[in-house]
């Protein structure tokens, strides 16, 4: 089978899984943003400053792994710029702040003030962002990043498609909570939610339109009708229910609905434990989203609650890829397919395969996924 | 009076807790007794967390209220008579700069009367060794959010061995991806999913 036919087959397989329809083979995706360069002999410093090289390392990893259907999120553009804008925080860069092959890390520091909430509410998100970003990132690199997205991103996507691999997400966004939590730092932001909820909420509300528009624009640019809608500190395990109900869920709901309305499938990439609130996902229209937990959410509970309503993508834990063995990987995938498959399941590393994943564990992930994931 | 302090703290009522502490001190209650009441409130918070009634944000709020209430007391919240639980050294291991989970554990351990030496983040193995020697701690906690912290934890355990401290110090590990398999991989004695697990481990080891 040629690559074009292979691409079509894989894309259709993923779409069927999203619609919770029967598949011949449970789709299997790669995700390992820091693992890919290390496995391909590229430093993380290069990976963060050479967007074409980062794409080549990712595509090379897919080809080396062989029989996977595609890739979940990977580094698009200048990686640390993406992280800085999602977290509204400075990111320590390999080759600059860290050794050449170290892992980038987000700096937990209070860069936003309380008054910034008022500025966002009064002036809107985009004007605030333009004045704020120089505090947390290199604006020259930011401009290069934006230019790369417009001029080079579609071309790079074409290389994945030509090789037969499906890039699953075309745009990246999150809810306003995550961005401001990064900018204020977690402890201060959580205390703000208790002390000054109306002030925070006014800022969150003002941010929503821009966060939807950015994801829609990226999907249009890429031609991929799926958007990564991430969450990490807004997880159920992190927040009292009354906070989650007020500051988290309404924003996931509204952003998801806006994306769905534009024909875009939200990929709810949810790190940490969201088990408590999984039932809320039934409020979203059936077969329009993908839940992508990281191994901490009870994925079996998700299956029980969402079977036939929402596809589940996951969730081989990072610790198994890093410190486990191929036998551990096989056992995990076998149980996952048995308990959560075969329909509405997409096999993928939970969150992101870490930098120190053992290559033999990634190879075992692909082999086990194909062995246990065969339906017909 | 002390009941009012512990109950209001356990209910996460900031103003009521601070007012009750002020009232108790004005009435001549010993600061150590007031602190004990605050600590009792924090123990109740920990229990509610373990039972699934409270979540991380509640722990952070409780720690914040505890800190505010404690500022009225003319005694430290660690060390001296207030620290009855024993010495503990804790830090995020080398190569990892994440502090939030570690900070929550530190707050809860201090509230549970442990004398905690917090070494911060990106802590090299030799600093753990020095701190254990300086404080005589019987428990050390290694925190890490990233999987690259596993090997740092392993090196820190090796440093304890090399310094001849391993047999006299219990090692607990915690942070996002850590679990029983990671605990075994790094050569630790116990693994905690959250701050209440850390307190349970310390209690079981120090009271044994």
Image (tube, coloured by chain):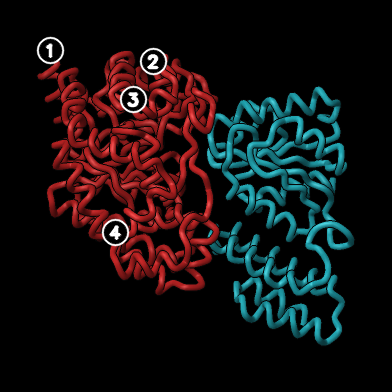
Chain colours: A red, B cyan
A54 to B28, vertically: above or below:
above
Q: Secondary structure at mark 4?
A: helix
Residue A32 appears at what percent x and percent y?
39, 28
Residue A180 appears at what percent x and percent y?
41, 57
Local crowd at mark 3 within 10 Å, few (<14), some, or many (≥20)? some
Q: Which residue bears the numbered disc 2?
A: A40
Which-is-in-front pick, marks 1 and 2? 2
Q: Quadrant of the C terminus of chain B?
A: top right
Q: Secondary structure at mark 2?
A: loop
Q: Tell me whether marks 2 and 3 sit on the same chain.
A: yes
Q: CA distance from mark 4 to mark 2?
A: 40 Å
Q: Which residue bears the numbered disc 4?
A: A127
Which-is-in-front pick, marks 4 and 2? 4
At 64% from the left edge and 44% from the top edge, which residue is drawn? B192
At 20% from the left edge and 53% from the top edge, which residue is drawn? A213
Q: Tell me whether marks 3 and 4 sit on the same chain.
A: yes
Q: Tell me whether marks 1 and 2 sit on the same chain.
A: yes
- In the rendered image, the residue lying farthest to the front is A140
Q: Which residue bears the numbered disc 1?
A: A1
Residue A97 appears at what percent x and percent y?
52, 33
Local crowd at mark 2 within 10 Å, few (<14), some, or many (≥20)? some
Local crowd at mark 4 within 10 Å, few (<14), some, or many (≥20)? few
Q: Which residue bears the numbered disc 3?
A: A50
């Amino acid at each position: 089978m040629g690559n074009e036919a292979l691409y079509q087959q894989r894309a259709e397989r993923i779409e069927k899984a999203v619609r919770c329809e029967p598949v011949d083979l449970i789709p299997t995706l790669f995700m390992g943003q820091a693992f890919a360069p290390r496995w391909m002999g590229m430093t993380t410093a290069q990976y963060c400053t050479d967007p074409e090289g980062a794409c080549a390392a990712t595509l090379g990893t897919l080809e080396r792994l062989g029989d996977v259907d595609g890739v979940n999120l990977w580094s698009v553009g200048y990686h640390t710029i993406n992280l800085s804008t999602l977290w509204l925080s400075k990111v320590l860069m390999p080759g600059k702040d860290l050794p050449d092959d170290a892992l980038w890390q987000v700096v937990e520091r209070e860069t936003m003030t309380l008054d910034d909430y008022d500025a966002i509410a009064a002036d809107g998100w985009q004007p605030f962002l333009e004045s704020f970003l120089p505090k947390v990132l290199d604006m020259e690199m930011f401009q290069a990043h934006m230019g790369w997205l417009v001029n080079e991103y579609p071309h790079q996507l074409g290389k994945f498609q030509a090789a037969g691999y499906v890039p699953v997400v075309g745009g990246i966004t999150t809810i306003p909570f995550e961005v401001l939590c990064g900018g204020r730092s977690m402890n201060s932001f959580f205390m703000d939610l208790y002390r000054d909820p109306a002030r925070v909420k006014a800022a969150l509300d003002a941010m929503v339109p821009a966060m939807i528009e950015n994801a829609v624009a990226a999907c249009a640019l890429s031609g991929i009708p799926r958007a990564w809608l991430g969450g990490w500190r807004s997880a159920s395990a992190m927040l009292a229910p009354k906070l989650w109900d007020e500051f988290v869920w309404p924003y996931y709901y509204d952003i998801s609905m806006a994306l769905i309305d534009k024909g875009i499938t939200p990929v709810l990439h949810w790190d940490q434990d969201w088990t408590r609130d999984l039932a809320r996902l039934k409020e979203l229209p059936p077969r329009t989203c993908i839940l992508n937990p990281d191994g901490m959410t009870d994925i079996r509970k998700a299956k029980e609650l969402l079977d036939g309503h929402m596809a589940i993508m996951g969730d081989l834990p990072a610790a198994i890829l890093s410190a486990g063995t191929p036998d551990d990987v096989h056992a995990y995938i076998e149980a996952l397919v048995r308990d959560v498959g075969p329909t509405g399941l997409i096999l993928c590393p939970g969150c992101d395969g870490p930098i120190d994943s053992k290559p033999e564990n990634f190879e075992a992930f692909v082999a086990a996924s194909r062995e246990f994931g065969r339906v017909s | 009076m002390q009941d009012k302090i512990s109950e209001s703290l356990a209910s996460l009522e900031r103003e009521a807790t601070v007012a009750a502490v002020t009232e108790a001190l004005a009435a001549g209650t010993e600061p150590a007794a007031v602190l004990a009441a605050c600590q009792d409130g924090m123990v109740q918070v920990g229990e509610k967390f373990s039972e699934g009634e409270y979540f991380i944000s509640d722990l952070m709020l409780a720690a914040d209220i505890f800190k505010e209430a404690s500022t009225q007391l003319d005694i430290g919240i660690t060390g001296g008579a207030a620290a009855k639980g024993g010495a503990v050294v804790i830090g995020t291991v080398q190569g990892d700069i994440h502090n939030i989970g570690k900070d929550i554990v530190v707050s809860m351990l201090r509230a549970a009367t442990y004398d905690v030496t917090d070494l911060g983040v990106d802590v090299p193995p030799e600093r753990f060794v020095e701190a254990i020697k300086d404080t005589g701690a019987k428990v050390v906690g290694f925190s890490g959010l990233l999987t690259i912290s596993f090997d740092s934890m392993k090196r820190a355990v090796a440093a304890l061995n090399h310094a001849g401290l391993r047999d006299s110090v219990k090692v607990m590990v915690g942070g996002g991806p850590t679990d029983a398999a990671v605990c075994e991989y790094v050569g630790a004695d116990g693994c905690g999913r959250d701050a209440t697990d850390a307190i349970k481990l310390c209690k079981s080891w120090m009271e044994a």
